[in-house]
Image (cartoon, rainbow, N blue to C red):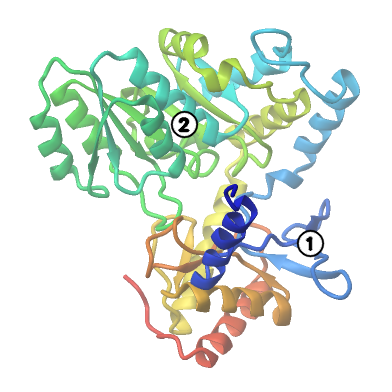
Amino acid sequence: MSFPYLARFQDAVAELKREGRYRVFADLLRRKGAFPTATYYGGDKPRDITIWCSNDYLGMGQHPKVLAAMHEALDTCGAGAGGTRNISGTTHYHIQLEQELADLHGKEAALTFTSGYVSNDATLSTLSKLLPNAVLISDQLNHNSMIEGIRHGGAEKKIFRHNDVEHLEEILKSIAPERPKVIAFEGVYSMDGDFGPTEKICDLADKYGGFTYIDEVHAVGMYGPRGAGIAARDGTMDRIDIVEGTLAKAYGVQGGYITASAAIIDAIRSYAPGFIFSTSLAPVLCAGAIASIRHLKESNAEREKQQAAAGRLKAMLKGAGLPVIDTPSHIVPVMVGDPVCCKAVSDTLMRDYGIYVQPINYPTVPRGKERLRFTPGPLHTPAMMDTLVGALSDLWKHHELPQQSVA
């Protein structure tokens, strides 16, 4: 008798549904110039909803400069890039984009990838192979792409407690001085919304001969001079060996990248399978990213409006007694603590209030830490916030959820 393949797949999905972790994708159509509203096609008929969980933090996916640049590139080059960068997929747009990114972070060179996930996975796994007998030391709350990249590299790994620099130092002390030590951490942690202690980590790297790698995907465009990220804000960017980021969040387009010295970039470019064997970003995406980066290097208006919106929403949620985590960043998590209830609240918000926010469940966050994660932006109005907080207050009472602030 052969293995019951189909039944196994069905059982695996059923298990997720029993746990309340089964994900349903919303059928949405963003409309140019109308963000954060969109058309939802999941009900009896299409209707307007408000998006509260987009990572297009500044609305740059709708910016006229970005759209104009993409139209021009499409008319100039057509659709795709034509292949991998090594064969036929490098265009002038790729070169210009990498120059803009290197300039943004004050590094000698940059390298683009098809996504931020791929840039982390490909780079960290390649570092393990290029640095003999290396130890990769990872913050406990690093993104899955960093975890997988470290795992794929096959080097020894150690995990330090989240943002605990004393624990990090204990680990560094335990490693022979001559061994390569890669410290991987983030600028903004996307679920709890806190910052990585870049200066203290750089101090430890200097003290123990470490190599620093920062993921700035939730920080680029958002913080620091010209939007270069948390390390730029902290004045530590020149002390970090590799800065990794994305073009798909605050810049509103798609793609990932790393910036570093020319020697590091050349080595990753030459050895990373995730770069070598992937079709390159379409020129139209590069063009949009270039326009977005250039604009946000010069303009603080979007950042200021976004921070004001995040502060306003946090204050309103606190005022309503809802369990919001008081983060220092633009990310606004509201704790639920149960996967079934978290999904039920999300479903009701969409169905009855026209509010779209996805439930955040395990494995994205630990079990028992389920939450709704809001990302207010410069285009969310006070009226939208009033509707959101009123709806949440109703549902918290209906589900008898705890109503207290979370420090």
Across and down, in percent, residue 152 comes to 41, 29
In the rendering, which numbered label is found on residue 38? 1
Please, is residue 159 above or below residue 236 in the view? Answer: below
Going by the numbered disc 2, the residue's amino acid type is: Asn
Give the distance between the C-alpha atoms of the residues marked 1 and 2, in whole angstroms: 31 Å
Sort mark 1 into few (<14), some (14-19) or many (20+) by Cα contacts within 10 Å: many
Instruction: Name the side, left or right, on which 308 lies relative to 291.
Output: left
Mark 2 burial class by Cα count in 10 Å: few <14, some 14-19, many 20+: many
Observer able to see residue 142? yes
Identify which amino acid the numbered label 1 is placed on.
Answer: Ala
* Rendering coords of residue 114 (x, y %): 62, 29
Q: Which quadrant would residue 402 be assigned to in this image?
A: bottom left
Disc assigned to residue 120: 2
260 or 363: nearer the eye? 363
Residue 375 in view here? no
Q: Is residue 333 above or below residue 217?
A: below
Judged by depth in the image, the label closer to the viewer, 1 or 2, is 2
